[in-house]
Amino acid sequence: MTKKRKQYNAQFKFKIALEAVKGLKTINQLASEHELHPNQISQWKRQLLEEGATIFGNGSVQQQREAAKTEAELYEQIGRLKMEVEWLKKSTQFN
């Protein structure tokens, strides 16, 4: 029997990470109070500190990641189309 992983909403993660940043309680105390692993709290805290500045920016981190993914897919498609054009040029030269 497998145990289903718990999923926490963004509000809960933010609350716990903010408590960790404040430093009023240790990460171990927070972990035992909320039944979390200390590494998970450390990860949320690090994420808050690294990506916190983007909250007031022109877009969210999620939007930036999606834009980067779309850009990569488009460059990949351009590369394939260039290869196809080159192949078509070569195949028509021999005929």
Image (cartoon, grey):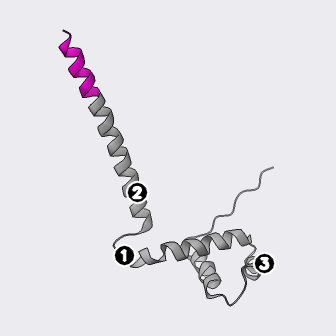
Q: Amino acid at mark 2?
A: Glu
Q: Is 88 part of what is drawn in magenta?
A: yes
Say whether residue 36 is left or right of residue 55: right
Instruction: Work out whether 73 lies above or below 82.
Output: below
Q: CA distance from mark 1 to mark 3?
A: 34 Å
Residue wearing tag 3: 32
Label whose residue precedes the other's in the sequence (1 or 3): 3
Label whose residue precedes the other's in the sequence (3 or 2): 3
Dot 2: element: helix
- In percent of width and height, residue 22 lies at 62, 88
Counting every numbered tag in the picture gives 3
In the image, what residue occupies the spot 66% across and 73% down?
A: 42
Residue wearing tag 2: 66
Q: Dominant secondary structure of the magenta stretch?
A: helix
Range of magenta residues: 84-95
Q: Amino acid at mark 1?
A: Gly
In the image, what residue occupies the spot 76% across and 81% down?
A: 33
Q: CA distance from mark 3 to mark 2?
A: 35 Å
Q: Does the residue at mark 2 contact the one at mark 1 (Cβ under 8 Å)? A: no
Q: What label does residue 71 carry, if any?
A: none
Which one is in front, 5 or 88?
A: 88
Which one is in front, 10 or 88?
A: 88
Instruction: Work out whether 93 lies above or below 38.
Output: above
- In percent of width and height, residue 30 lies at 72, 81
Q: CA distance from mark 2 to mark 1?
A: 16 Å
Residue wearing tag 1: 57
Using a 10 Å C-alpha cutoff, classify the residue at mark 2 as few (fewer than 14 neighbours), some (14 to 19) or many (20 or more).
Answer: few
In the image, what residue occupies the spot 74% across and 70% down?
A: 37
Residue 68 quadrant: bottom left
Q: Is 69 part of what is drawn in magenta?
A: no
In the image, what residue occupies the spot 24% across and 27% down?
A: 85
